[in-house]
Image (spheres, rainbow, N blue to C red):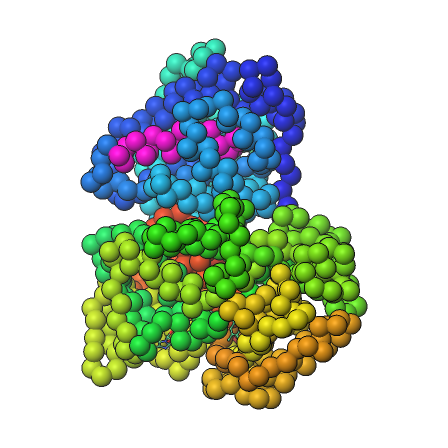
């Protein structure tokens, strides 16, 4: 999970050279001109963009390196947008892989030789991610560009990219060190994946004209052209993908060019059917097929466009992040909610802790938390700086990107990325924490061990414990955040708010019914009802787990008024906001009541007294009855639920065969649905809402998805039905 950084040195021209591959990252002659020649012109991007009729264009690259190709493409796209402000093509997606990310300082040094790309370079450096395997989605709003930087080996990653039926990629930048220096990359497996992800007429450009590349690409269905190479290179290759040419070519690896069924990998497509296998292997085979690759719902109906109207129902973090994700893509949204004001449910607590829940191993749950957390941090930085720009007040962000000269007072601040310490408050926790440190799965920029001296220094209070420190974490005020996100969505001119609209049901043609006979027509509906989903017909096939929770707002006094970081143990305590600290929280299953309770206040205090028993501050913890209770909505596997809502009961017969070993790829994909949900954020909504809203918006617009297939499956609405089917419980 923690990536290996590249080791580089710089030659006399200031060009970085990879020690491991003994090859240059870009041409000694001129990096920018090489990119223009091989990749921009090699893919005829200017001509293709001018004729493009869809709202987004997707470039995929192998080998991100210094990011030079990306910066040039982003620069060109901005110029295209400026010259053609009313053109239907509005957004660029650049998806790229990198096995050995360069350290930020090396990237900065390498790119410093390109003053014409200064603005692009600064934007990249500001957002450059930590070295963690998986997808980092980074938004370059000023350039109308989104970068999905996938850290890891291209061979492992491309198979994890979901492709819609028509393909995912419009142009390939086939980079990587020379085939002679990096033969492991230039393989048939890579070319097969390129074919799987390409659309009919998808183009490619590559600096090499090596025979192995020419033959490999031709074999999977690319039509190859030779062009004059750049600089000292005589030839290079360009070409385009033709879906039919591969099937006509006897030598072609056509199976891999066929689009994967949703959620499956090409490997599983090529597996023989279990019936053709000997009995002993049949069982193993069907077990393998039961791994999470199955008929998980992937949106394959027509993409939403700015002609469409979406109704989002809810008023918490899920609904707000959904509104912003859609409106910034020019989709018209009406937000309906049951009360007079926003964030009256779980998102109404004055303060919430912001951190990922990480285990020692890179489990699906931990990877999801880590990537959601990193995305959310960038997202909140962007919300906070944009909202302050919008209201023309002083920017008070304290981010790694933007350090304000004037230190904000705590009263002004409704968030603080002051870090989170998970205290080692008993031996059992100590063993768990030691395992996490020893297993060394996570980069220290995400989570690291701190001794008791460092705990004291970071926390500002006397705590005789070691712990784990999450430097990018902190606390936020969810209602303030919801309000800010909604303000930003409103500023697009695409959002209408409808308070006092309590959702009752919807019809298959998109009529959404509310109480008191109100109704609104929509092309798509997103239900983000939090615990309001319990008992709603639309959710009757999903196993929902409501859990009541109460959090105290205790008055700040010595010594806890000095607390400078969020403390986590069995509960959590935040630094003060407006003179009070959040002290939480209780868990009462299946309890939908939301009045504060005296016994739960006592319980919250007791949790802290137990965990902080060895401290002076424990005697100063007192509550005065100021508390708030709400219901978290969770799911049986504790993961969020994102995607289409179906009436799975009516679909059961179709999937019943999974229980008797029918291969996943042979069952039909789930039908279209015009209703989706973002739900079950449990007790980590601050961490997960932004990325999952982005996943849903990208799904509905048929853009690249910023999560590996296994993570997409782990949050998919259909996973419960699939598991039941596989267990033969239909
Ligand atoms: C005590 C407690 C402490 C927590 N602490 C933290 C923390 O420290 N960190 C963290 O990350 N998370 C925390 N959480 C979890 C976090 O608050 C939730 O994950 C998140 O707020 C869920 O957001 P949501 O939008 O899905 O649901 P909600 O915020 O509950 O929003 C759902 C909204 O839907 C509306 N609605 C419901 N039914 C209808 C209907 N029929 N029609 C119209 N509108 C409807 C409601 O008004 C409600 O506002 C905590 C939760 C609780 C309860
Ligand atoms: C020539 S450099 C790319 C230059 C880059 N496009 C740029 O603009 O700076 C090749 C890159 O491919 C990466 N790479 C090599 N093998 C890889 C693999 N198997 N998977 C992913 N990346 C790989 C290298 O680490 C290196 O960063």
Left or right, residue 428 beside residue 240 = right
Residue 181 shown in magenta: no
Left or right, residue 173 beside residue 604 = left
- What residue is drawn where x is 76% and y is 56%? 453
In the displayed structure, would residue 354 be above or below residue 337? above
Give the image location of residue 266, x and y in percent. 48, 46
Please identify the quarter of the rendering in which residue 229 is found: top left
Give the main secondary structure of the magenta stretch. helix
Q: Quadrant of ligand 1?
A: bottom left
Residue 66 shown in magenta: yes
In the displayed structure, would residue 690 be above or below residue 173? below
For the question of whether residue 429 can be seen, the reply is: yes
Left or right, residue 218 beside residue 490 = right
Residue sitting nearer the eye, 328 or 264: 328
Residue sitting nearer the eye, 249 or 479: 479
Give the image location of residue 652, x and y in percent. 41, 72
- What residue is drawn where x is 25% and y is 37%? 52
Q: Which residue is the extreme one toward the bottom?
A: 598
Give the image location of residue 480, x and y in percent. 42, 65
Q: How many marks?
A: 0
Residue sitting nearer the eye, 536 or 444: 444
For the question of whether residue 217 can be seen, the reply is: no
Please identify the quarter of the rendering in which residue 60 is found: top left
Question: Magenta region: which residues?
Answer: 63-82
């Amino acid at each position: 999970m923690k990536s290996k950084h590249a080791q580089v040195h710089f030659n006399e021209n200031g060009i970085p050279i990879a020690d491991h591959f003994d090859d240059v990252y870009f041409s000694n002659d001129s990096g920018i001109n090489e990119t223009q020649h091989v990749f921009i012109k090699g893919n005829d991007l200017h001509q293709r963009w001018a004729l493009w009729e869809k709202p987004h264009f997707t470039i995929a690259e192998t080998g991100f390196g210094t990011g030079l190709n990306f910066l040039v493409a982003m620069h060109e796209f901005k110029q295209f947008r400026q010259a053609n402000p009313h053109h239907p093509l509005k957004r660029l997606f650049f998806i790229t892989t990198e096995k050995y990310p360069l350290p930020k300082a090396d990237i900065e040094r390498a790119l410093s030789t390109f003053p014409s790309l200064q603005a692009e370079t600064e934007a990249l450096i500001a957002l450059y991610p930590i070295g963690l395997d998986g997808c980092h989605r980074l938004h370059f709003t000023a350039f109308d560009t989104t970068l999905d930087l996938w850290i890891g080996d291209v061979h492992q990653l491309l198979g994890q990219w979901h492709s819609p039926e028509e393909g995912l990629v419009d142009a390939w930048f086939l980079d990587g060190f020379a085939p002679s220096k990096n033969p492991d990359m230039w393989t048939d497996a890579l070319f097969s994946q390129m074919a799987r992800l390409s659309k009919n007429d998808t183009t490619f450009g590559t600096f090499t004209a090596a025979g192995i590349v020419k033959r490999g690409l031709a074999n999977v269905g690319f039509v190859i052209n030779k062009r004059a190479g750049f600089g000292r290179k005589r030839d290079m290759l360009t070409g385009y993908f033709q879906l039919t040419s591969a099937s006509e070519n006897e030598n072609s690896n056509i199976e891999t060019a066929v689009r994967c069924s949703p959620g499956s990998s090409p490997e599983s497509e090529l597996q023989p059917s279990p019936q053709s296998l000997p009995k002993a292997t049949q069982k193993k085979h069907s077990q393998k097929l039961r791994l999470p690759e199955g008929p998980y719902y992937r949106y394959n109906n027509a993409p939403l466009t700015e002609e469409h109207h979406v109704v989002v129902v809810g008023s918490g973090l899920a609904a707000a992040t959904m509104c912003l994700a859609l409106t910034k893509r020019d989709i018209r949204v009406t937000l309906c909610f049951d009360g007079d004001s926003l964030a009256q449910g779980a998102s109404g607590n004055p303060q919430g802790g912001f951190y990922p829940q990480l285990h020692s191993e890179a489990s699906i749950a931990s990877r999801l938390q880590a990537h959601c957390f990193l995305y959310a941090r960038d997202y909140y930085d962007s919300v906070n700086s944009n909202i302050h720009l919008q209201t023309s007040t002083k920017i008070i962000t304290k981010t790694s990107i933007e350090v304000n000269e004037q230190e904000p007072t705590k009263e002004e601040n409704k968030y603080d990325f002051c870090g989170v310490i998970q205290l080692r408050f008993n031996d059992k926790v100590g063993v768990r924490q030691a395992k996490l440190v020893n297993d060394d799965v996570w980069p220290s920029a995400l989570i690291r061990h701190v001794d008791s001296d460092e705990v004291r220094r970071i926390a500002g209070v006397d705590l005789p414990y070691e712990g784990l420190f999450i430097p990018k974490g902190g606390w936020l005020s969810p209602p303030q955040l919801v309000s800010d996100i909604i303000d930003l969505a409103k500023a697009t001119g695409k959002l209408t708010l409808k308070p006092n609209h309590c959702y009752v049901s919807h019809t298959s043609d998109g009529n959404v019914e509310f109480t008191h006979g109100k109704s609104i027509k929509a092309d798509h509906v997103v239900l983000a009802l939090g615990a309001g989903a319990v008992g709603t017909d639309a959710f009757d096939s999903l196993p929902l787990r409501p859990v009541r929770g109460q959090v105290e707002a205790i008055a700040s006094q010595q010594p806890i008024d000095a607390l400078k970081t969020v403390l986590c143990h069995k509960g959590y305590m935040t630094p003060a906001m407006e003179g009070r600290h959040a002290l939480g929280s209780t868990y009462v299953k299946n309890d939908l009541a939301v009045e504060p309770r005296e016994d739960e206040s006592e319980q919250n205090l007791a949790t802290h007294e137990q965990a902080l028993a060895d401290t002076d501050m424990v005697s100063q913890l007192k509550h005065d009855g100021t508390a708030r209770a709400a219901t978290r909505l969770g799911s049986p596997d504790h993961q969020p639920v994102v995607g289409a809502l179906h009436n799975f009961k009516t679909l059961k017969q179709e999937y019943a065969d999974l229980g008797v070993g029918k291969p996943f790829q042979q069952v039909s994909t789930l039908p279209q649905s015009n209703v989706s949900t973002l739900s079950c954020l449990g007790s980590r909504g601050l961490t997960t809402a932004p990325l999952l809203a982005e996943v849903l918006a990208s799904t509905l617009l048929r853009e690249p998805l910023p999560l590996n297939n296994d993570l997409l499956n782990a949050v998919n609405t259909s996973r419960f039905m699939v598991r039941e089917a596989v267990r033969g419980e239909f």
